[in-house]
């Protein structure tokens, strides 16, 4: 990666509901990598003409596909838009990370030490 002198900043905070720009599935951000941090095998499995840049934030999502089947997704920032539908998420792990909603975003659950 070329050093541009700029720090990378995540556009979407943890708890933000988002939607995939191309595939339309929805998710809630539960973690963010400042740039690509997955395997080369995963990256190479993406068709070359759809492969995102590595030097951007990548988001870990509690995701649901169109029939609301839950899974975890790893998505580049360029492929996400805010999900403003207001529809609730039914992901079985949502309560492990969040404790309800406030102002359209999920509130991070703070675990006791």
Image (spheres, rainbow, N blue to C red):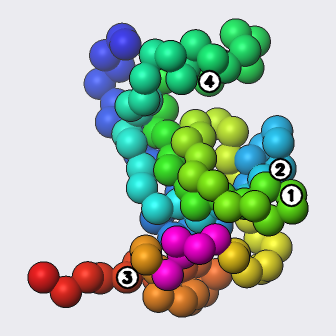
Q: Which residues are magenta?
A: 91-95
Residue with the mark numbered 3:
109
Q: Are marks 2 and 1 in contact (CB under 8 Å)?
A: yes
Q: Which mark is residue 98?
A: none
- Residue 92 versus residue 62 in the image, above or below: below
Q: Position of residue 77 (x, y in %)?
A: 58, 41
| Residue located beneath label 1 in the image | 66
First-in-chain label (4 vs 3) = 4
In the image, what residue occupies the spot 50% across and 16% down?
41
Determine whether, in the image, residue 80 is placed left or right of residue 31: right
Question: Which SS class for mark 4?
Answer: loop
Neighbor class of circle 3 (other Cα within 10 Å; few <14, some 14-19, many 20+) is some
Mark 4 and mark 1 lie on one chain; the one further toward the N terminus is: 4
What residue is pinned by disc 2? 24
Dot 2 or dot 3, earlier in sequence: 2
Asked whether 104 falls inside the magenta stretch, the response is no
Question: Mark 4 vs mark 2: which is more N-terminal?
Answer: 2
- The secondary structure that dominates the magenta segment is loop
Give the quadrant of the N terminus: top left
- Tell me the residue at 64%/71% (across/down): 91
Residue at position x 48%, y 32% from top? 56
Residue 23 seen in render: yes
Which residue is label 4 attached to? 52
Give the side of residue 52 with respect to residue 23, left or right. left
Q: Secondary structure at mark 1?
A: loop
């Amino acid at each position: 990666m070329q050093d541009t002198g700029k720090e990378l900043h995540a556009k979407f905070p943890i708890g933000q509901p988002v939607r995939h720009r191309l595939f339309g599935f929805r998710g809630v951000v539960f973690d963010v990598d400042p740039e690509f941090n997955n395997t080369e095998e995963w990256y190479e499995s993406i068709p070359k003409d759809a492969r995102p840049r590595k030097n951007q934030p990548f988001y870990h999502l509690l995701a649901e596909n169109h029939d609301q089947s839950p899974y975890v997704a790893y998505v580049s920032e360029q492929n996400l838009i805010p999900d403003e539908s207001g529809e609730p998420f039914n992901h079985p792990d949502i309560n492990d990370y969040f404790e309800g909603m406030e102002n359209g975003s999920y509130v991070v659950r703070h675990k006791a030490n």
